[in-house]
Amino acid sequence: QVQVVESGGGLVQPGGSLRLSCEGSTTLSPYTMAWYRQAPGKAREFIARITPDGSGTSADSVKGRFTISRDNAKNTIYLQMNDLKPEGTGIYYCNPWSIVGDWGQGTQITASS
């Protein structure tokens, strides 16, 4: 299985930006990778995914504000989050697209003034 560690979260004001990282314990190059968010009291939802060749797809709710990217040489997936909104608050997780369950710790983002 692929083990990943998410980092880069924190407290940010609405309208601010953060860049999240998802580092794999080994190469992530064969996998379509995805970011998810679990807001307080809500189910985990899809945010964005990226194919091995770098083609990204984002949820409509974040399109134009969030950008997913990857650096396979660093075994790392990134999520650049711009214009964060209060509803963007939650725990952000990274996983291979094919994985349902087996979630790691995630990284907490709080968008609050």
Image: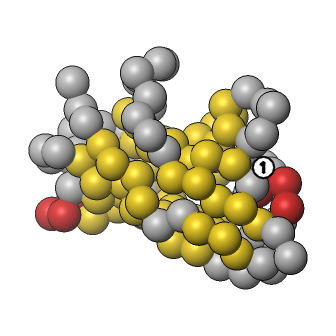
Q: Quadrant of residue 102?
A: top left
**Residue at x 28% of width, y 54% of height:** 23
* Residue in the picture at 42% in, 60% down: 7
The quarter of the rendered structure image containing the N terminus is: top left
Asked whether, in this view, residue 73 is left or right of residue 17, the answer is left
Quadrant of image for the C terminus? bottom right
Give the percent coordinates (x, y) of residue 8.
47, 67
Quadrant of the rendered image containing residue 42:
top right
Q: In the displayed structure, would residue 32 be above or below residue 98?
A: below
**Residue 40 can be seen in this image:** yes
Residue 63: where, in percent of width, then height? 73, 59
- Report which residue position mark 1 lands on: 60
Answer with the quarter of the image where residue 15 lies: bottom right
Q: Quick one: 66 or 8, which is closer to the camera?
A: 8
Query: Which amino acid, mark 1?
Result: Asp
Instruction: Give the residue displayed 40% in from the left and 52% down from the top.
Output: 6
Looking at the image, how many numbered discs can be counted on the residues?
1
Any part of residue 48 in sight: no
Q: Residues within 10 Å of mark 1 (few under 14, many from 20)?
A: few
Callout 1 secondary element? loop
Q: Is residue 72 left or right of residue 45?
A: left
Q: Is residue 13 left or right of residue 21?
A: right
